[in-house]
Amino acid sequence: MSQELLSIKEASEWATKFLGRPITISNIQYLIQYARVPKSFYKNNVAINLDELKVYYEKNTKKEEAWKKRLGNDLNWGLSFSHLKESDTTKHVHRLHPYKGKFIPQLVEYFLDSHLNTFKKEVFFKSGEIILDPFMGSGTTLVQSSELGLHSIGIDISDFNCLISKGKVGKYNLSILDKKARDICFKTREFSQEVFDDSFDEELKEKLNEFNKKYFPNPEFKKKVWKGVINNEEQYGEEKLKQFLKENEEFFEKNGTKDKSGLINEKEMNNFLNKWFSKRVRQELFYYIKLLKEIENEDLKNILRVIISRTARSCRTTTHSDLATLTKPQIGPYYCRKHKKLCIPINSIVKHLIRYTYDTISRIDEFSRLKKNVFSNVIHGDSRKVNIFEEVKKKNFEFYKLLTKKKIDGVFTSPPYVGQIDYHEQHAYAYDLFNIPRKDDKEIGPLFKGQGQKAKEEYVEGISKVFINISRFIKDNGDFFIVANDKYNLYPIIAEKSGLKIVEQFKRPVLNRTERDRQPYAEVIFHMKKK
């Protein structure tokens, strides 16, 4: 291997030429940061060995070839956005709250901005035009439209999805937001410190640490498990857990409460909150909610709800191996198969709350400097029958006048897939925290209805009704872009039933997934127009 070294800037220029697509300095820095390529030094500056960089990109080129062999040569690898860092795909307000099933902002940008390439041969939208997303979700289309100088409207049946989206595109006095968010955050910390005994948690961690050193010494214990010296890991772990709880029975009876007179009445709390949050976490959450009620400004109150909801999601009482999908609540210590020792779930929101408060303020500040002065309107309603113009008129008459003058220019959306996600259930904790009604029965293609023939027929009917309804508000030559993993080939039927025609399809590999060891699959961006 040669020793030719490139600076980060030179590596960016070489990779751009080698791959035939832009590779930024930030992309190269990501490769170094995450050890995708080894870091070298030349005259005390960071450098990269050219041969090692070439090996990395050739390996990725082979991956592209393998995927195309499985999924077809019409795969647009550029739409994989494989060169991006996570911080790029979760930039500014896109990271305000977790949400299953959202697309990355770069996919929206690709079709809404003015660039052209061998796949995208025309510009579909220009600054000042109006974009609609009838399946708004967490508001990605609205956020990116705001960045690009496009007016936007989002519709969603889920009240909580509307809450998140309003939080992202809302306009704030940042100094007031900063002051109020910090104030309510630190008042919650004060309440927690007054009512609960932090020394309880600290002492519990010390007791667990000493117990784990004795009965689960690492790496020795892990080696015994791997080599089969411990025949039944689960049984051994449960036996030691019982021993730990018995030895500390009197300690647990204290429960960490310092001043019971300060506790909030738990009769206000419903079953989900009682089931999935520890007593201390419940009390801290409801104290924060209590302070929220004192805030009159609805936009400010809304973004603070986003902060506390994000915090609540991270502090559910579950095991380390079940963070993504809840299986059963775990209030106290447990044997953790992931870490091969006794662990405890999160027992206070304070650290997460402080971190998310600062993070939210920072992200909103960043986005406020990027977004253009355009209209962004969130409609809580059913896209199958909502009157878009009338709903906008209620909230923003100036936007309404623009709409009636020129109509909506196009659509960019990703409808739910058949039988994959229950969109209300993924945020069950938030519905309960804020006491807002759920409309699970109005979801199109929810997980609980499965993927059988009846579910597919209902899905086709539901999506078609949406497209028929929104077409009334779209100009005659408007462009519809629909992102779908159409493994059942339903969208040609949907287009026909909706009075639309598919004029082009863009097929992209889906690489940005949280699940591991999934088989390669693609999704299609259907470009449709009215017949």
Image (cartoon, rainbow, N blue to C red):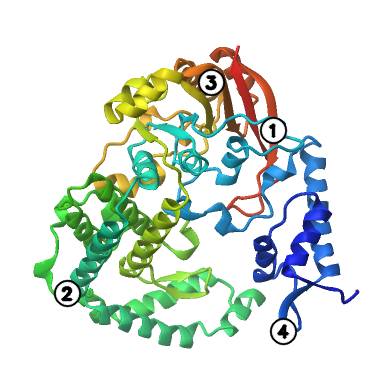
Q: Which residue does the image show at 21% across and 75% down from the upper left?
A: 193
For the question of whether residue 250 can be seen, the reply is yes
Tell us which disc is closer to us: 1 or 3: 1
Residue at disc 2, secondary structure: helix
Amino acid carrying label 4: it is Asn
Q: Report which residue position mark 3 lands on.
A: 460
The residue beneath circle 1 is: 506
As measured in the structure, the alpha-carbon distance from the residue carrying label 2 to the one carrying label 3 is 55 Å
Element type where label 4 sits in the image: loop
How many residues crowd around disc 3 within 10 Å: few (fewer than 14), some, or many (20 or more)? many
Give the residue at x 30% y 44%.
Answer: 431
Whether tag 4 and tag 2 are in contact, CB under 8 A, the answer is no
Of label 4 and label 2, which has the lower sequence position? Answer: 4
In the image: residue 183, left or right of residue 353: left
For marks 4 and 2, give the CA distance: 52 Å
| Amino acid at pointer 2 | Glu
Residue 492 lies, in percent from the top left, at 64, 19
* Mark 2 residue crowding within 10 angstroms, few (<14) / some (14–19) / many (20+): some
Q: Determine which of the numbered discs, if any, sits on residue 194 in the image.
A: 2
88 displayed left or right of 507: left
Q: Residue at x 24, y 70 (%)?
A: 189
